[in-house]
Image (cartoon, rainbow, N blue to C red):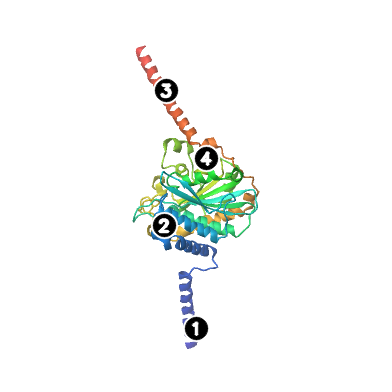
Amino acid sequence: MRKISFIFLAFLISMCFSFSTTNNTVRADNPESASILEIKQLISEIYISSLDEVKNRTAGSHGESAFADILSGKLSEMGLSFLPETESFTQSFSISDNKTSKNVVGFKNNNSENYVVIGAHYDSIYLEGLSYGFNDNLSGVVGTLQLAKKLSEVNLNYNIIVVFYGAEEVGCLGSKYFLSQLSSEIKNNILLSVNFDSIGSGDKLYYFHTDYPTQYGNIIDSFLSQQTNSFNKPNTNRLFSSLFNNDLNYTTISLNSDNSSYIKQGINSLFFFAGDLDTNNGLGFFEKQGYSKIMHNTDTEQVNISVFGDLFYENISAITDLCFNLFADESFNESNFYAGQIDVILYSDWALKILGVILIALIITGFYIFVNLKDKKKKQ
């Protein structure tokens, strides 16, 4: 009996020890946990350790420039090189009379004539004590670094360009400048541009390519529908969101990020963000548990993690894993994606403004005719 009691006691102790280690350590043989560990480590390396210097990353600021240097160092560590026509990881551009910003650009040469671009903006909205750009857009930066690291370790049948855009918050200036400096040889052979913006904080994961069907869009929709993680493609209403600037419409949000620069040049672009557009009349993208505009007004590590916990890191991991699998998938590699597939006129700001003016003119004309006909009837 004493022997049985001893065995039972030893069993209980081993079970307690097993339970304790399972719940308090991250198992390295669990791919998702390992990925989350790497994401947390990246955040610590590039952000937390330099927080005082880089928490203010407004366009043209010292913090933005300092963060650009950190990102350049990470690309160098991965063994990435410069673009063929450049001599540095950074490209500077003017954003005002006395301010400049930078893009940070890395290149993985797989000896192909085609290219895939992955990127995120690294500038942010800064409010002292309230907002340091943790979700918007440190999450996108970390996701891009994580994906770039994976892609740097494999050879695919297209070259990889990694871009961190400056000055996104003041009009997507970095992505516009980047495309303006690309040679036509590269620009005309971009199969796909992927943009990560605010991919950490949110109960749901969203993706967007264009409002109109294309071959590459159909392939992406089909691929994402087969994934274990649920990726949502919201309904879009490009025309009315553009004419009336309806903030509740998803498309308006999507065209305020760097993917818009590619779409407006007819280049395939895939955009990811996290949020919940089904709550609070569609404003769940911005609000959660009483925190107004987590993206901008309360965008610190403390708020994001207290509200979303490990889901913040899991979202980043899920999106980067998905993109890596997409790039390696046969349906993506065998498809004949090409620049110019998107009808540029549909995304032209000036064309939509003209259409809006015409629409308003027709309404006024119709109203004028209606009033005149009414007056004529009265006189008769």
Local SS, label 4: loop
Is residue 109 left or right of 282 when viewed as pictured? right
Looking at numbered disc 4 in the image, what kind of residue is underneath it? Lys
Q: Nearer the viewer, residue 252 or 189?
A: 189
- What residue is shown with label 2? 54
Cα–Cα span, label 2 and label 4: 31 Å
Q: Circle 1: is it few (<14), some (14-19), or many (20+) Cα within 10 Å?
A: few
Q: How many marks?
A: 4
Instruction: Tell me which label, 2 or 4, sits earlier in the chain.
Output: 2
- What residue is shown with label 4? 264
Instruction: Tell me which label, 2 or 1, sits earlier in the chain.
Output: 1
Image quadrant where one finds the C terminus:
top left
- What residue is shown with label 3? 365
Q: Nearer the viewer, mark 3 or mark 2?
A: 2
Cα–Cα span, label 4 and label 3: 32 Å
Residue 315 seen: no
Residue depicted at x 39% and y 47%: 280
Looking at numbered disc 2 in the image, what kind of residue is underneath it? Val
